[in-house]
Amino acid sequence: MAPRVFSFNSSRETGKGESFHVMHGFSKIKGKARHPMEDVLVSLYKEFKGHKLGLFAVYDGHLGRDVADYLEENLFDTILDEPDLFCNPKTALENAYHSTDAVILQMSHPGGSTAVTAIVVDNKRLLVANVGDSRAVLCEAGEAKQLSVDHEPSAERQLVESRGGHVTHFPGDVARVDGQLAVARAFGDKSLKQHLSAEPHVCEVILSERSEFMILGSDGLWKVIENQVAVDLIRGIKDPEEAAKCLTNTAVQKKSRDDISCIVVRFHA
C-alpha cells in the first residue's frame, strides 16, 4: 500500500487513515473558551531510510495556535534530520525538541504549545516524546500504560525554582508557573522561558502481539477520563475513528471545558 499523508487542522473534526499495517482515527471538539480551537493533530505515513514510519502528534497551543502550527509543519522534519534517531532515539528526540524550541524563541510568537509525538517504526518499535500535559497511553492486552509524563508545575516545582521561577496554587485553580502557565515544560512561551524547560520525556516500547492500540490526547481529554477508563471504553471498537469520537464525546459528557483532541492508533491492522 502506498503511503498516505494526513495533516489535520481545525476545519476537520474527525477522520481516519491507514498504511503500513497501522490504522488511525482522530476526533477533536472545541472547548468552551472564547478563543479559537488551539489543538493541532498530525499524522504522517512515510518510508524513510529503509523504514516504514507512522508519525503521530498532538500539539495543544496556548495564547494562540501559532506555535502549534509551527510544530505541525516542522517538528517531525527536525526529528527525522537527526542521524541517530533509530540507534539512539533518546538523544535524537531531545536534540530535535531543543533545536525546535530555539527556533521558536527567535520568532515573534508570544505563546507556546505542549506536544506529544509518537513514531511507529516498522510496526515493531514505538518512540514517544512529550513536553507538557498532552499524553500518550498504550493498551497492552487490555492494560493501560502511560508512556508520557504530565509536566505539571506542582510536580516540577524544584525545576522551576532552580531556574528562578515560582509555582503558585490558589484555591479553586491548578498550580501555575509564575501564576500563569499550568505546565512546567513547553515549546515557546518566550516571556516565561527562563523558568520553563523544553526537555522532553522520552520512552521507547518494543511492540508485540499484546500491543493493541495507543491513544494520544490533549489535556482536555485526560482531565476527565482516567487512562484505564479510556482504554476500557474503546477496546471493543475496531474502527479507530469511532473510538476517537467515543473518547471526545465522553469527555464532553463529563463536562470537560477545554479543547478536546485525540488520535487512536491501532497496531497490526
Image: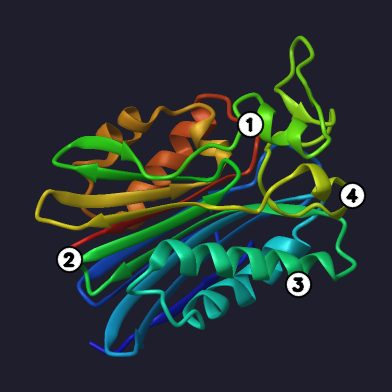
Amino acid at dot 3: Val
Q: Which of marks 1 and 2 precedes in the sequence?
A: 1
Amino acid at dot 2: Ala
> Vertical placement of 168 versus 178: above or below?
above
Q: Which residue is mark 1?
A: 156
Q: Which of marks 2 and 4 precedes in the sequence?
A: 4
Q: Residues within 10 Å of mark 3 (few under 14, many from 20)?
A: few
Local SS, label 4: helix
Q: Which residue is mark 2?
A: 269
Is residue 180 found left or right of 85 in the rendered image?
A: right
Q: Which of marks 1 and 3 precedes in the sequence?
A: 3
Contact flag, marks 3 and 2 (Cβ < 8 Å):
no
Front disc: 2 or 1 = 1
The span from disc 4 to disc 1 (Cα, nearest Å) is 19 Å
Residue sitting at x 87%, y 56%: 110
> Vertical placement of 125 versus 253: above or below?
below
The span from disc 3 to disc 2 (Cα, nearest Å) is 37 Å
